[in-house]
Structures are given as C-alpha cells and as structure tokens.
Image (cartoon, rainbow, N blue to C red):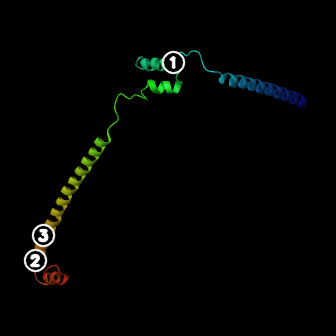
Amino acid sequence: MARTNNAASGRRKNRGTQRAQQQAAQASQTSSSDSASGLASVTVRVPEAGKPFIEKAAELMREGAEPIAALRRAGGGFDTSDPPPSRDQALHDDEAASRRDQHQMARLRNRLETQEMRSAAEIGYKVRSLSGWRLTLAKMAGLIA
C-alpha cells in the first residue's frame, strides 16, 4: 500500500510540473504579445452622456495621439477656453476678506470692552455701597481710593 501512495504522489508531482511548465509557456507567450504595438480595435459600451467624450478620444487616437493624452484632451484637460483667474482679483478678494475680519474683530472687541466696563462699574457701585468692616476691607484692598 505504501508503494501505491508513493507512485500516486509521484504522478501528482509529474502532473504539477507539467502544469507549471504549461503555465510558464503561456506566460511567456502573453508577455511577448504584450510587447506588440497595440490593439487594432476595441468595442466599448458607454452611457449616452459619455459618447461624445469617447468619440473625441478615439478621433484624437486615430490622429496619432497617445491614449492617455487623448483621453485627457477629450476630457478638457488642456482646455484653454476659460482664462485663468487673475492674481489681482484674488488679491482683492483676499484684502476684502481681511478687512471684513478686522471689522468683525473690532466690533467684537468694542462689545467686550463695553461689557467689561459695565461690569466694572457695577462692581464699583456695589463696593461703594458697602458699609462697616466690609468697606474697611475694600479700602485696604485698594478698591476704593
């Protein structure tokens, strides 16, 4: 029985090596076909909205453009119809934003100062209305001149 197992495992090894050799041969054939110049034609299914894009890219490829460049150009990667935004406008927007921020900060600062002054006035009024030993402590603390 041991011989039968050894013989069977030997056959499996032969089959495995034959399969590995076949796969290696297929891989070498595939790699040699990959180095070919390209495909003659390709059929692609696209939604109706994408049809003009694909047609434009195919036209550019027929004219000799690289596929990546053709797809980029068909998608508008090199579209120069809209001028780039001017630096002056960007600087003007930036200055306007900084002025607006400064104005908001000044308003906030004024409101906080008003609140602080009001609270200080309220504290002063309350301290001055103290009497007895509490008034003496307030004078010793320097709250009342």
**Mark 2, mark 3: which one is toward the viewer?**
3
Q: Is residue 124 left or right of residue 102?
A: left
Residue assigned mark 1: 63
Residue 15 in the image: above or below residue 117: above
Classify residue 127 by image quadrant: bottom left
Residues at badges 2 and 3 in contact (C-beta under 8 Å)?
Answer: no
Mark 3 near mark 1, Cβ–Cβ under 8 Å? no
**Residue at 19% across, 61% down:** 112
Residue 133 position within the rendered picture, expressed as x and y whole percent measured from the top left: 14, 84
Of the numbered discs 1 and 2, the one sitting upstream in the chain is 1
Identify the residue at image location x=84%, y=26%. Answer: 11
For the residues labelled 2 and 3, the Cα–Cα distance comes to 10 Å
Disc nearer the start of the sequence (2/3): 3
Determine which residue is flagged by label 3: 121
User: Which quarter of the figure is the C terminus placed in?
Assistant: bottom left
Helix, strand or loop at label 3? It is helix
Q: CA distance from mark 3 to mark 1?
A: 83 Å
Disc 2 marks a residue whose amino acid type is Arg
Looking at the figure, which quarter contains the N terminus? top right
Residue 76: x and y in percent read 41, 27
Residue at (80%, 25%) from the top-left corner? 18
- Badge 2: residue crowd in 10 Å (few <14, some 14–19, many ≥20): some
Name which quarter of the figure residue 130 lies in: bottom left
**In the image, residue 32 lies at what x, y percent?**
70, 23
**Residue 6 point in image, percent of width and height:** 87, 30
